[in-house]
Image (tube, rainbow, N blue to C red):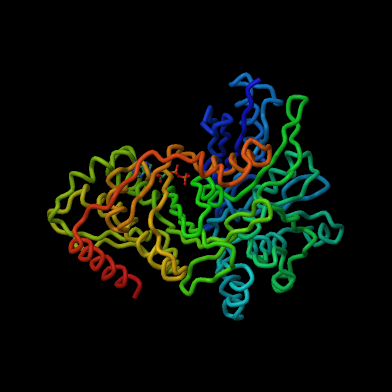
């Protein structure tokens, strides 16, 4: 009987379930879009029940579609959108409020208050993070303070918190296991990433009771069993999406890094066993913990990457499909020197300037749609340069190549330019489903078809490598031009 691994990839815009064979090749993918709620300016919510029902539906669908019996599934791995916060009633199982999504900015004022109270240094030392509404802590506090009955539920020990991994696990294991994995925990702004436990000090500052928090465990663990079709399937792994992609790209060595170019861009660099803070504003996070071996990563994100392409497509109506941008790039006029800074929702690392907005410099009567598209794509490469520069300075390690994935990794002209600007080889993996693949590898470790992480490195295959080809002078000029303009909007 053939055996398989299943990954649940619960993302921001959709939930996906992916079936892998024992060689970690994708056999099938099923997917369902997720409803987005925007009840107020800057608020973003999901319905936790919809997420749960979609995931259950998709698991059943993939089993039926592929004529599989649950006993053929060696184990399930769960990877998820991070930071998104759910609070629910332990007795009824019902959410107290919608899930507050990582993009939600409603707790900005509370974060400003925490900064004014000078908690930044302490929070950074304990959690590796910067005070920001992005992380779960202030979202939890908002729900506790704004919803009725939460105090009573806390008193009776009936209030539960979880990020999406925890919410799914508790429900899939028929309300038995209240667990999270160490990578998801490290994005709550409540977790001490050195001592590997919830920080009593931060819980006290934020007045969040420890009783509502899940137990934190490693990424490969006995996460219990899911009941399905009168049978059960073992859940053997959990990891936050970007951490899972780092594993899916087999970045187990210090200095190895991956960059995922989806809606936003998330760059993670493995920095090894020791906790380190960057001098600039990169986040320090737990990369993964497997068999008692814990590694840290630096993380930097560019808020607007693929979503700049969506903006050109949907708002400016420059083209029909994102994939058209590759061809249009080639039509750009070589003599046009425009600079697009698509800071549509502010700038992320290393600037952390949420209030800055985008700009286009150097427009002339000759500027065409292609010029704007090319320059927008190039801007993502320049921003990656700024991030990498910052990571190298802080880690003391030279990045020699970078593994990339995500929707924008389909754009050859973008990748070539990225390689030129970074002056390193850009590697695309054979399997583009790297987020799902990472947690599938981890589930494989749990069920024993993989013995150690070095086996993952052996399994991992690249599709193509892009090498830098640009004159030193041109590169220097382009970078100078970029920095001149980015400094203009920052100042
Ligand atoms: P997410 O996981 O964040 O939903 P994906 O990894 O699926 O994102 O990538 C989707 C993003 O990639 C979209 O914003 C889209 O505009 C962009 N994208 C897709 N194909 C291309 C392409 N060929 N060139 C440039 N951008 C692209």
Between residues 108 and 167, which one lies in front from this camera angle? Answer: 167
Q: Ligand 1 shows up in which quadrant of the image?
A: top left
Position in image of residue 261 (x %, y %)? 42, 49
Does 104 sit left or right of 199 as displayed?
left
Position in image of residue 307 (x %, y %)? 40, 50
Q: Residue at x 19, y 62 (%)?
A: 362
Does 387 sit left or right of 119 as displayed?
left
Q: Residue at x 57, y 29 (%)?
A: 21
User: Quick check: can you spot residue 355?
Assistant: no
Quarter the C terminus occupies: bottom left
Q: Residue at x 76, y 27 (%)?
A: 231
Position in image of residue 265 (x %, y %)? 43, 54
The quarter of the displayed image where residue 303 is located = bottom left
User: Quick check: can you spot residue 399?
Assistant: yes
Instruction: Please tell me how many numbered marks the rendered image carries.
Output: 0
Between residues 90 and 459, which one lies in front from this camera angle? Answer: 459
Q: Residue at x 65, y 65 (%)?
A: 193
Quarter the N terminus occupies: top right
Position in image of residue 64 (x %, y %)? 63, 21
């Amino acid at each position: 009987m053939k055996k398989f691994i299943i990954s649940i990839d619960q993302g921001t815009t959709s939930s996906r379930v992916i079936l892998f064979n024992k060689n970690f090749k994708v056999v099938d993918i099923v997917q369902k879009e997720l409803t987005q709620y925007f009840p107020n300016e800057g608020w973003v919510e999901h319905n936790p029940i919809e997420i749960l029902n979609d995931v259950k539906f998709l698991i059943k669908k993939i089993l039926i579609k592929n004529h599989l019996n649950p006993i053929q599934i060696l184990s399930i791995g769960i990877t998820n959108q991070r930071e998104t916060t759910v609070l629910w009633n332990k007795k009824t199982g019902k959410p107290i409020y919608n899930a507050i999504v990582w993009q939600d900015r409603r707790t900005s004022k509370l974060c400003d208050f925490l900064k004014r109270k000078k908690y930044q240094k302490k929070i950074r030392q304990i959690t590796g993070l910067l005070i920001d509404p992005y992380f779960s802590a202030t979202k939890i506090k908002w729900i506790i303070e704004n919803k009725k009955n939460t105090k009573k539920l806390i008193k009776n020990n009936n209030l539960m918190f979880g990020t999406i991994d925890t919410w799914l696990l508790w429900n899939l294991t028929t309300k038995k296991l209240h667990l999270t994995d160490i990578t998801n925990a490290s994005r709550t702004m409540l977790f001490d990433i050195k001592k590997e436990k919830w920080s009593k000090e931060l819980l006290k500052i934020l007045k969040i009771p420890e009783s509502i928090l899940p137990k934190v465990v490693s990424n490969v663990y006995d996460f219990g069993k899911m009941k399905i079709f009168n049978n059960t399937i073992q859940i053997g792994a959990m990891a936050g999406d970007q951490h899972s992609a780092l594993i899916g790209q087999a970045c187990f060595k210090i200095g190895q890094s991956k960059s995922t170019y989806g809606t936003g861009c998330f760059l993670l660099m493995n920095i090894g066993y020791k906790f380190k803070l960057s001098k600039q504003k990169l986040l320090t996070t737990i990369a993964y913990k497997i068999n008692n071996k814990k590694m840290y990563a630096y993380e930097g994100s560019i808020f607007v990457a693929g979503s700049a392409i969506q903006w050109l497509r949907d708002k400016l109506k420059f083209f029909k499909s994102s994939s058209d941008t590759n061809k249009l790039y080639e039509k750009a006029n070589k003599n046009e020197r425009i600079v697009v800074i698509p800071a549509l929702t502010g700038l992320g690392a290393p600037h952390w300037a949420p209030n800055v907005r985008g700009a286009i410099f150097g427009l002339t009567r000759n500027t065409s749609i292609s010029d704007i598209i090319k320059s927008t794509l190039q801007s993502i490469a320049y921003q990656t340069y700024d991030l990498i520069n910052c990571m190298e300075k802080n880690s003391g390690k030279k990045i020699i190549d970078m593994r990339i994935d995500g929707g924008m990794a389909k754009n050859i002209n973008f990748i070539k330019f990225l390689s030129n600007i970074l002056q390193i080889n850009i590697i695309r993996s054979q399997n583009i489903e790297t987020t799902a693949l990472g947690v599938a590898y981890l589930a494989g470790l749990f069920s024993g078809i993989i013995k150690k992480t070095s086996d993952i490195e052996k399994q991992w295959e690249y599709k193509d490598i892009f090498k830098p080809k640009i004159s030193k002078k041109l590169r220097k000029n382009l970078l100078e031009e970029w920095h001149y303009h980015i400094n203009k909007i920052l100042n």
